[in-house]
Amino acid sequence: MNKIKIALVEDQRLFRDGLHALLKDVEDFEIMGVMENGKIFLDKLATYPVKPDVVLLDLNMPEMNGVEVSKVMQKKYPEIKIIILTVYDQERFINKMIEAGAAGYLVKNCDLEEVIHSIRTVYKSEFYFNETAIKAMRNASKHKGALLQANGNIQIELTDREKMILQMICKEFTNSEIAEKLQLSTRTVDGHRNNILAKTGCRNTAGLVLYAVNTGIFESKLF
């Protein structure tokens, strides 16, 4: 079994130790490291020959907070998925962290089952947004319609195929699953996904979901 490699970065010792104790016994998880702040984490990460798949990252920490760490990781380690842990559920924090590159956002009073589910979902689908995050994205939306607003105020229209693939990405289908359902090669789906990223200026899959919700391309009936 390929285990999901996890790092935990949290400055509150009681919460950090408690979460570590709960997660270390999950069969498909491997806890690679437990750090007390972002600076220590980034220093250690640079020395790891094998990087973690997912990082549980506290938003408020001394020396380097979650926003600062996320920005560094987006440049140096974009393949590592970040799940933010915080006591804040305000919409402005949620959208700020998604825009900074976070693949998921959890409030610290959530159930352990949701933490486990979010890690597995981010590992498989590259993002995890619960009802709170989706609502925050919708409320922050300023533009609706079929056009996406890219950087520089240049409007770029997605093709029907690209919109369909983007909708399936939002429903947590992997590239191989999309390829099978649309009877395409995985390489073709990869190409479409890269085109969507290039057109929208998004950094990752989580960013694509944010764009899809903001523009009305994706309307989940679950929330």
Image (tube, helix red, strand yellow):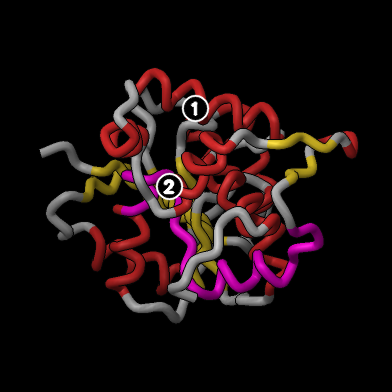
User: In the rendered image of this protein, does residue 103 appear above or below residue 51?
Assistant: below
Where's residue 26, x and y in %? 17, 59
For the question of whether residue 131 can be seen, the reply is yes
Q: Which residue is mark 1?
A: 46
Where's residue 135, x and y in %? 60, 73
Instruction: Name the kind of residue labelled 1 in the image.
Output: Ala
Instruction: Name the kind of residue labelled 2 in the image.
Output: Met
Of callouts 2 and 1, the N-terminal one: 1
Residue sitting at x 65%, y 64%: 137
Which residue is nearer to you in this view: 96 or 153? 153
Residue sitting at x 47%, y 39%: 165
Q: Which residue is mark 2?
A: 168
Residue lying farthest front?
A: 160
Which residue is nearer to you in this view: 143 or 17? 143
Quadrant position of residue 92? bottom right
Image quadrant where one finds the N terminus: top left
- Of the residues tagged 2 and 1, which is closer to the observer? 2
